[in-house]
Image (cartoon, rainbow, N blue to C red):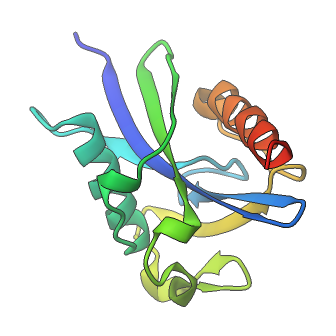
Amino acid sequence: MDKIKAYGVCIYKIKGNTTKILLCKSVKSQEKWGCLKGMSLRFEEPKDCARREFFEESSIKVSTDVFEEYFEQTNKTKDVGIWLVNAKNVEDIEDFFYEDTLGNNYLSWENSKVKFFNIDKLPEIKTKQKMLIQEIKSFLKNKSQSR
């Protein structure tokens, strides 16, 4: 049997010395967080899956043209691939949030909460995304320091 492939988007924003990433807590999860992502449909291109899943889980439209670096974590049963997207490249993104938390009217049934976290104060991360989030965090720390 083929391994499940899931793709998604991690929105980030850099303001001054602070970098934040957007994470979600699914309704099934106790207190663990992860990127907004989902399983690809048969014959669906990975970037198209990431764009579709991100929209389904947040109501926010993101063009694949603004996808930046790609990160992947391979796991026993499900591989997870995430593209970074700078919040500056997402039209009207601030309209969807109140104090860094996605408005409940934009939440999908799959998530109990979606919010931005400072990369230096991340919540507990889902096992199948721990290495991936760590790589994203390291990449963004280097990116913000080189500005």
Task: Report whether 96 appears left or right of 118.
Answer: left
Task: Report whether 136 appears left or right of 9.
Answer: right
Q: Residue 20 location, x and y as percent?
A: 74, 59
Q: How many labels does the image show?
A: 0
Q: Which residue is drawn at 70% across and 65% down?
A: 116
Nearest the camera: 114 or 48? 48
Q: In which quarter of the image is residue 81?
A: top left
Q: Residue 16 location, x and y as percent?
A: 86, 66
Q: Residue at x 61, y 50 (%)?
A: 29
Task: Report whether 69 appears left or right of 2.
Answer: right
Q: Residue 139 location, x and y as percent?
A: 71, 34
Q: Residue at x 58, y 28 (%)?
A: 128
Q: Residue at x 66, y 50 (%)?
A: 33
Q: Residue 124 location, x and y as percent?
A: 78, 44
Q: Is residue 77 above or below residue 31?
A: above
Q: Is residue 143 above or below residue 113?
A: above
Location of the N terminus (image quadrant): top left
Nearest the camera: 55 or 63? 63
Q: Residue furthest front?
A: 147
Nearest the camera: 106 or 90? 90
